[in-house]
Image (cartoon, rainbow, N blue to C red):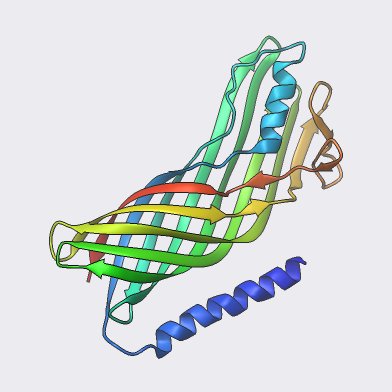
Amino acid sequence: MIARTKRILVISLFSLFSVSALAAGGGGSSIGFFIGTTGSTQTDMNSLIDTQNSGSDGPISAGKLTSAYEFSGHWSYRFSNIMGLHFRPSYFTQTTDGTGTAGSYDYGITGFTLFPMMRLFLLENNYIKFFTQVGIGWGFANGVIQEPGLKVEFSGNASGFIGGIGAEFCIATVHCINVEGNFRYLPIERMTVDSASGSNAGSGLSQYLSGEIELGDHDLASSMSGIMGVLGYTYYF
């Protein structure tokens, strides 16, 4: 399944770049950066927090993982009057920490995404551009679970897709402010252990020492999915 997903991703990326190379019409390039939040809920890790809250050391002061911060740069090339190619790598971070009577707790997911997108400009003038965009890409996540007497670091990756709408408000010919609303589907169904130490006594983890990390009767999953609100800056050249 993973090999098949990779082939689909490679073929799709090749198609995106082929379209841009063959399309007629003039265009231009731009670079910029974005900051935003993603409503991504880490269901399995939140289950571990619930276990600790209801245990002998609880309640603990760590909050639930329900929203992440994202920081990204971008490069775009507009190859026709209405269409362009937009490439956006981003850094994803979502952490929480707290304490209980037995010690400190730390849970988190950080990682990177790589998403090329096709952008369609729906309406524009010299001061504002409305667009919609869609793309497929890949996410790479690293996680940590640290509880009193236990620390597990793990990682995983998966492919996904993104789509949304946005607008550019240009304060000069080459300087624009971006506002976007996107939805990204990027679940990572299986994480694997990178390092582990300590005992899982009192934790909700059922396995973490043989390369697998499991919660109850299933693999521990993470997510980089969610509704994204984005604010950014674009420079045209």
Tell me where residue 205 appears, x and y as whole percent.
80, 32
- Residue located at (43% from left, 62% from top): 88
Nearer to us in this view, 84 or 200: 84
Q: Can residue 31 be seen?
A: yes
Left or right of 230 in this view: 175: left
Residue placed most toward the observer, 11 or 128: 128
Q: Quadrant of the N terminus?
A: bottom right
Q: Is residue 100 above or below residue 66?
A: above
Q: Is residue 148 visible?
A: no
Rendering coords of residue 150 (x, y %): 76, 27
Q: Quadrant of residue 202?
A: top right
Q: Residue at x 50, y 53 (%)?
A: 183
Number of numbered discs: 0
Q: Residue furthest front?
A: 123
Q: Residue at x 75, y 23 (%)?
A: 51
Above or below, comparing residue 78 to residue 156 in the picture: below
Where does the image place residue 102, in percent across and percent down from the top left? 71, 12
Position of the C terminus by quadrant: bottom left
51 with respect to 83 (left or right) = right
Provide residue 139's location: percent of width, then percent of height.
Answer: 59, 57
